[in-house]
């Protein structure tokens, strides 16, 4: 019986547990995960960025049962687990509430979910607090999907808001640079590279995988001729 395609599904755990077809992409993911650092990947929407982020989350969380039979199962050290922060900026409600309020709500929620006392202060202070507290359990993995959504949404509509959001995110992402010693891996995705030099000026160690030939087939499907 052939497996169903996981159309519209972005959660690796759900795909595996519900028996959907998963094309094994764990070999290129291993190259990223096994080399601590900060990585950036740009692709259009619906190209598999979110499933990639979800897979990395499960990998660093030590969910070995989800990787049975995949390439990475016998390559990964499953005894090592890391605290993981996964943030998706398309779903935080910035259109309805404004970006600053949406980020405050998100960070307060992550702080609560991780059993930490509330943290006063601005979004950068809360983000810094969250990373520092989680680092007591091990080096932290930060996964940010659609890093540019609060900017792209306003292009051609409201440039003042787009610029304001860019400056806010620039300050937010700078926290990653200042806490580099506490981070195992940073992985960011987005649909654009236009803001790379501006928004990541504080994150100058970012490795751009967008056009790297070794990662050309990491997302999506490719056709292969069979003998």
Image: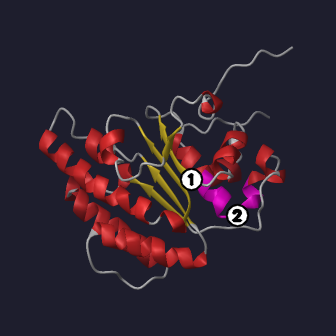
Name the residue located 66 percent from the left edge and 23 percent from the top edge: 222
Quadrant containing the C terminus in the rendered view: top right
Q: Is residue 204 left or right of residue 137?
A: left
Label for residue 215?
A: none
Display coloring? secondary structure
Pointer 2 residue: 62
Name the residue located 71 percent from the left edge and 46 percent from the top edge: 19
Does 156 appear above or below 175?
above
Q: In this view, does 21 lie to the left or right of 122?
A: right
Q: Give the x, y percent position of residue 158.
A: 14, 40
Name the residue located 38 percent from the left edge and 63 percent from the top edge: 175
Q: Earlier in the sequence, mark 1 or mark 2?
A: 1
- Residue mark closest to the camera, 1 vs 2: 1
Label for residue 37?
A: 1
Name the residue located 20 percent from the left edge and 44 percent from the top edge: 162
Q: Which residue lies furthest to the bottom in this view?
A: 117
Q: Give the x, y percent position of residue 208.
A: 50, 38
Q: Residues within 10 Å of mark 1 (few under 14, many from 20)?
A: some
- Range of the magenta residues? 56-66
Quadrant containing the N terminus in the rendered view: top right
Magenta segment includes 60:
yes
> Which corner quadrant of the image does residue 48 belong to?
top right
Q: Residues within 10 Å of mark 2 (few under 14, many from 20)?
A: some
Secondary-structure class at tag 2: loop
The residues bearing labels 1 and 2 have C-alpha atoms spaced at a distance of 19 Å
Q: Residue furthest right?
A: 227
Secondary-structure class at tag 1: strand
Q: In this view, does 125 lie to the left or right of 133?
A: left
């Amino acid at each position: 019986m052939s497996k169903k395609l996981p159309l519209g599904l972005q959660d690796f755990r759900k795909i595996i547990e519900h028996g959907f077809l998963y094309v094994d992409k764990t070999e290129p993911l291993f190259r990223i995960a096994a080399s601590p650092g900060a990585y950036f990947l740009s692709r259009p929407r619906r190209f598999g960025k979110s499933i990639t982020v979800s897979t990395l989350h499960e990998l660093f969380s030590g969910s070995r049962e989800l990787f049975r039979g995949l390439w990475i199962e016998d390559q990964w050290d499953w005894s090592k687990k890391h605290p993981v922060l996964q943030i998706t900026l398309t779903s935080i409600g910035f259109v309805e509430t404004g970006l600053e309020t949406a980020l405050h709500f998100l960070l307060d929620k992550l702080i609560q979910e991780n059993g930490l006392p509330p943290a006063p202060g601005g979004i950068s202070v809360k983000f810094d607090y969250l990373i520092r507290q989680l680092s007591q359990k091990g080096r932290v993995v930060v996964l940010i999907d659609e890093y540019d959504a609060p900017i792209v949404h306003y292009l051609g509509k409201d440039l003042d808001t787009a610029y304001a959001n860019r400056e806010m995110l620039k300050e937010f992402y700078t926290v990653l640079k200042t806490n580099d010693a506490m981070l195992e891996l940073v992985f960011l995705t987005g649909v654009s590279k236009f803001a790379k030099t501006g928004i990541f000026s504080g994150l100058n160690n970012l490795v751009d995988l967008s056009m790297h030939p070794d990662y050309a087939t990491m997302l999506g499907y490719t056709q292969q001729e069979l003998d």
